[in-house]
Amino acid sequence: MKREREEFLKNLVNATGPSGYEEDTVRIWREKAKEYTDDVRSDLHGNSIAVLNEGKRPKIMLAGHIDEIGLQITYIDDKGYLHFAPIGGWDPQIIQGQRVVIKGKKGTIKGVVGKKPIHLLRGAEREKVVDIDQMHIDIGVSSKKEAEEIVDVGAPAVIDYYYERLQKEVAIARGFDNRSGAFIVLETLGELAKEAKSLNVSLYAVATVQEEVGLRGAKTSAFRVAPDIGIAVDVTFATDFPGMDKNKFGDIKVGGGPVIARGPNINPKVFELLVKTAEEEKIPYQIEAIPRGTGTDANAIQLTREGVATGLVSIPNRYMHTPCELVNLDDLDNIIKLLSAFIRRVKSVEDFIPFK
């Protein structure tokens, strides 16, 4: 991946932005979008929309959600310990003992998630995962008054992990789910901006909010854009590491290329053109069978207004919803290539009517 592109990705995933508190990540995304187009919009929900060629048909919407899972402070006790609830889907085993960053009243605050040490657990306690409501965050103060001077109830927090490279193009970060998708949809628009006049379509790259708490931003932004074709870009479960059952979850490899979804949430004509494009452009790709709703923004987009021709292209991701999700940067670059080439091939709305 080119250095400038990787720097944008790094800045995006390192920012704090759990569902409902996406402002820091949105600011970074919008600033980058202004390098590609003069038409960058926002809405009352918090979604961000960058537009090329408005007025042409078909209308294509690319959606990547920009929120992440996180924590929210729910109570400050008399000793100044912060109690919290999850934002999005957490494995409680992941949270205990982690450093966290909290958005405080005057800036960020560091803390650590605490619980009773294993040495003091007895019998069945040792066999049970500690519930989130039995944990707390220690910010190093000794009273409620001292804590309330710097943080308040409702403040969001994230695990204190950041972007790093491992070997070659393999990288880890806290927020690849799904800042990498928001990154891809904008970089795709950037790739096409230089040839906008030659395209047959209008293009809307959307950084959606609040996906982790119910696909909420995709519902509102898709209603506003009213696309003919909508493609969600998200992460999916890689199955190339120990413990993963390929019989259940398919054969998905990190570094194996874009993952193109197929199933009832996916318009068959969109699927066929994505596969054809990948083959003609010699882009490696993988297919994921999803015989139901995909659990991504594609669900919401497909059911907008009278229906949208919907696709889903995913990034293979190991260790999803942990502080160190793992992806291969080549997969991100290849999805940008695939979507750009797909959009160049789109001619007519009627080509995507599935059953004629």
Image (cartoon, rainbow, N blue to C red):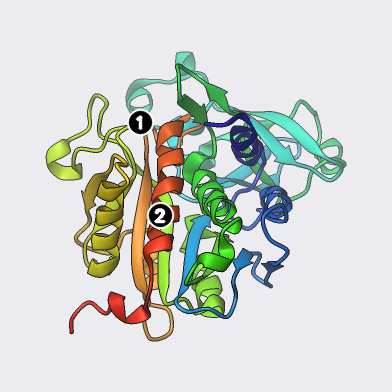
Name the foreground residue: 184 vs 343.
Answer: 343
Q: Is residue 283 left or right of residue 232?
A: left
Quadrant where the C terminus is found in the figure? bottom left
The furthest residue to the top: 119
Give the SS element for disc 1.
loop
Name the foreground residue: 202 vs 229.
Answer: 202
Question: How many numbered badges does the structure rendering display?
Answer: 2
Q: Is residue 312 left or right of residue 176?
A: left
Q: Is residue 211 left or right of residue 252?
A: right
Q: Mark 2 Cα within 10 Å, few/some/many (few <14, many 20+)?
A: some
Q: Mark 1 Cα within 10 Å, few/some/many (few <14, many 20+)?
A: few
Say above or below: 21 vs 283: below
Seen at 69% across and 72% down, the residue is 44
Name the foreground residue: 221 vs 45.
Answer: 221
What residue type is disc 1 on?
Answer: Lys
Name the foreground residue: 345 vs 32.
Answer: 345
Q: Earlier in the sequence, mark 1 or mark 2?
A: 1
Q: Mark 1 = which residue?
A: 128
Q: Mark 2 = which residue?
A: 341
